[in-house]
Image (tube, rainbow, N blue to C red):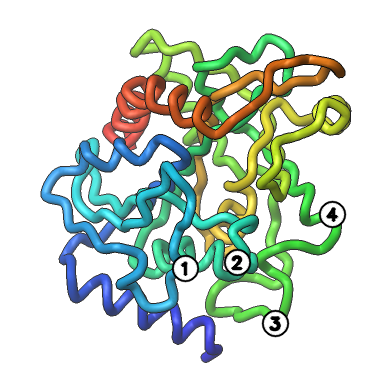
């Protein structure tokens, strides 16, 4: 038994002592999207600062609390805010909560994030269904699976094709159509942040095949798949990335939060519909 496995079990035991919920689904709620947790019935809320091994989120728009209860007819555990690499944590700390969600029993992970639209035509305020991802920091070795592997947690070399489960994506498309929600699909790329992208970087990531770009999600999905979880992902397009030199407008976090808050009710309805269909 590795030290990481013991740390996961310690956190799991602490949470189970506070809540009797045996979650089937884990949720990670990104920038400005934490209000979705308000829809969870019979909630038990635990601050990250209380959970052994959890890092503390320092970003505005990330409350930093775990919420357990019922949503869409499913027992769930929701992360109200996530941990980011740019906050100074390493990738193991960033993804430790995903390990704990899996340890609590969650077999499915639904991830949400706020993202910049890279593909022309992706509009501010749209929800993009993620169909694949690009781990740009991983090109230089920044990955949560670096180091010794614990076979109790997953395989040394885990497959990442179908990282975003095709069957779950089909459910999401059906629910979106029933609710009249436009749901474009695309590839999400992670950059390390916290700086927003330069126009040259926007043009580069567009050439590399990204449709939306952000500063999270990818390491969480890698670890979820390492642990055998099925994954569904949504990006809220909170701004259209600037690709032209000399543009006077600038991306900012306040705009990201404002747009995410506006999209929140639609995303909540979509996720609740998916949960009800599972």
Residue 92: image quadrant is: bottom right
The tag earlier along the polypeptide, 2 or 1, is 1
Secondary structure of the residue carrying numbered label 4? helix
Which residue position is annotated with label 2?
89
The answer to whether the residue labelled 2 contacts the one labelled 1, judged by CB atoms less than 8 Å apart, is: yes
Which residue position is annotated with label 4?
139
Q: Is residue 248 left or right of residue 52?
A: right
Secondary structure of the residue carrying numbered label 1? loop
Question: Which residue is nearer to you in this view: 172 or 115?
Answer: 115
Question: Which residue is nearer to you in this view: 167 or 62?
Answer: 62
In whole angstroms, how far apart are the C-alphas of marks 3 and 2?
19 Å
Which residue position is annotated with label 1?
55
Q: Where is residue 187 in the image (x, y as percent from the top left)?
A: 69, 31
Secondary structure of the residue carrying numbered label 2? loop
Q: Residue at x 74, y 48 (%)?
A: 135
Q: Which of marks 1 and 3 is in front?
A: 1
Q: If the image is split into quadrants, where does the C terminus sit?
A: top left
The tag earlier along the polypeptide, 1 or 3, is 1
The answer to whether 200 is drawn above or below residue 225 in the figure is above
In whole angstroms, how far apart are the C-alphas of marks 1 and 3?
21 Å
Residue 251: image quadrant is: top right
The tag earlier along the polypeptide, 3 or 2, is 2
Q: Nearer the viewer, mark 4 or mark 1?
A: 1
Which residue position is annotated with label 3?
148
The answer to whether the residue labelled 4 contacts the one labelled 1, judged by CB atoms less than 8 Å apart, is: no
Q: Residues within 10 Å of mark 4 (few under 14, many from 20)?
A: few
Q: Where is residue 272 in the image (x, y as percent from the top left)?
A: 29, 31
Q: Nearer the viewer, mark 3 or mark 2?
A: 2
């Amino acid at each position: 038994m590795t030290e990481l496995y013991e740390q996961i079990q310690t956190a799991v035991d602490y949470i189970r002592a506070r809540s009797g919920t045996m979650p089937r689904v884990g949720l990670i709620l990104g920038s400005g999207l934490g209000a979705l947790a308000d829809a969870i019935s019979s909630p038990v809320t635990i601050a990250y600062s209380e959970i052994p091994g959890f890092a503390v989120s320092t970003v505005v728009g990330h409350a930093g609390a775990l919420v357990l209860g019922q949503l869409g007819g499913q027992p769930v555990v929701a992360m109200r805010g996530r941990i980011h690499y740019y906050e100074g944590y390493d990738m193991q700390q960033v993804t430790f909560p995903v390990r704990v969600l899996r340890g609590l029993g969650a077999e499915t992970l639904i991830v949400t994030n706020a993202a910049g639209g890279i593909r022309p035509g992706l509009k501010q305020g749209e929800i993009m269904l993620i169909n694949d991802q690009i781990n740009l920091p991983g090109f230089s070795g920044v990955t949560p699976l670096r180091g010794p592997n614990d076979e109790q947690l997953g395989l040394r070399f885990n497959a990442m094709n179908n990282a975003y489960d095709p069957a779950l994506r089909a459910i999401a498309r059906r629910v979106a159509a029933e609710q009249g929600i436009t749901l474009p699909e695309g590839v999400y790329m992670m950059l390390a942040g916290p700086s927003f992208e330069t126009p040259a970087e926007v043009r580069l990531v567009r050439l590399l095949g990204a449709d939306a770009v952000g500063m999270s999600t990818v390491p969480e999905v890698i670890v979820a798949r390492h642990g055998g979880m099925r994954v569904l992902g949504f990006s809220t397009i909170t701004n259209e990335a600037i690709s032209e030199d000399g543009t006077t407008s600038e991306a900012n976090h306040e705009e990201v939060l404002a747009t995410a808050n506006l999209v929140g009710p639609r995303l909540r309805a979509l996720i609740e519909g998916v949960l009800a269909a599972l």
